[in-house]
Amino acid sequence: MTPLGGISLKLASVVLFVIMSALIKASDVPTGEAVFFRSFFALPVILGWLIWRGDLRTGLRVNSLWKHVLRGVVGVSSMGFSFAALGLLPLPEVTALGYAAPLLTVIFAAILLGEQVRLFRLTAVMVGLLGVALVMWPLLTLSEVNQAVLLGIGFVMVSAVLRALVQIHIRRMAATEQTSAIVFYFTMTSTVLSLVTLPFGWVLPPLDQTLMLIAAGLIGGVAQICLTAAYKGAEAALLAPFDYASILFAIVIGYAFFAEVPTPLMLAGSSIVIASGVAIILRERYLGLKRFKARQGMTPQG
């Protein structure tokens, strides 16, 4: 696969994940139930993908089941908080506030993995978090700030923290676990854990909402496959900036289907977050190339 193919798949995954979020938002069912539909109906898509690749047997082998369970628990918690926020905040705001996750990943990588964070990256993270604060500001300065808005902001930020922790955990898992196994067992774990919420108010949705929830699961499964396949064709540093295209699709879908009009401060804050994120990515790419050239210039003795 060419880098262009990888970029195309990455953009496809971004669009599909935003559509999935919009369907979850429109379905108006309890969070645990939404997580179940998102996870359960993604399973046949993922299994079909593994069978098509001829990877069903080897792709489901694990070296540490505990690592997969931990990834599932934290990941499904992040998903649940994000879905809960969709019922309380506009889609573009949820998307923009979610950009805090990659910024927090930099901080957690320094704390938990011992990665060195230089002044440039630290400054970019601080500027990015300022952008997140700007996105929040219009929501916090409404003439009537209700509890639902505050709860929605809290849910998104908790989701971002948990998603950042998941990224750190996956970095550790990648050394011993296959990507296909990580994808499959996360979906299995989230399906099982979502059933725990069954006694807490699940509803029988009307046919149109049921179809939307099923579509969200199927689309989420396809999006996950597109995302996984994208990294087979292009470097992570090349693909990472395309994550931020999600805000464009979230604004369009939010306006077209939910009559959500983004505020100027939300747009400004999103731009700052995106700029800081891209700056970190480009800086890491530059340093990676420098390290590669340095290694190329070494003698066999190092």
Image (cartoon, grey):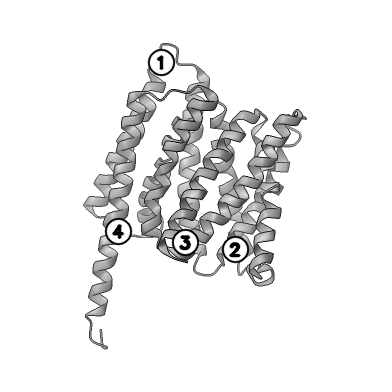
The residue that mark 4 highlights is 284
Q: Residue furthest top?
A: 143
Which residue is found at the position 23% from the left and 86% from the top? 299
Q: Amino acid at mark 4?
A: Glu
Q: Using residue 195 as the reference point, say whether residue 158 is left or right of it.
A: left
Which residue is found at the position 47% from the left and 50% from the top? 165
Q: Residue furthest bottom?
A: 300
Pointers 3 and 2 in contact (C-beta within 8 Å): no
Pointers 3 and 4 in contact (C-beta within 8 Å): no
Secondary structure at numbered mark 3: helix
The residue that mark 2 highlights is 180
Counting residues from the start of the chain, the first of labels 4 and 1 encountered is 1
Secondary structure at numbered mark 4: helix
The residue that mark 1 highlights is 142
Q: CA distance from mark 4 to mark 2?
A: 26 Å
Q: Amino acid at mark 1?
A: Leu
- Quarter of the image with the C terminus is bottom left
Packing grade of label 4 (10 A; few <14, some 14-19, many >=20) is some
The residue that mark 3 highlights is 231
Q: Using residue 287 as the reference point, say whether residue 155 is left or right of it.
A: right
Report x, y in % for residue 67: 58, 60
Report x, y in % for residue 249: 46, 37
Secondary structure at numbered mark 2: helix
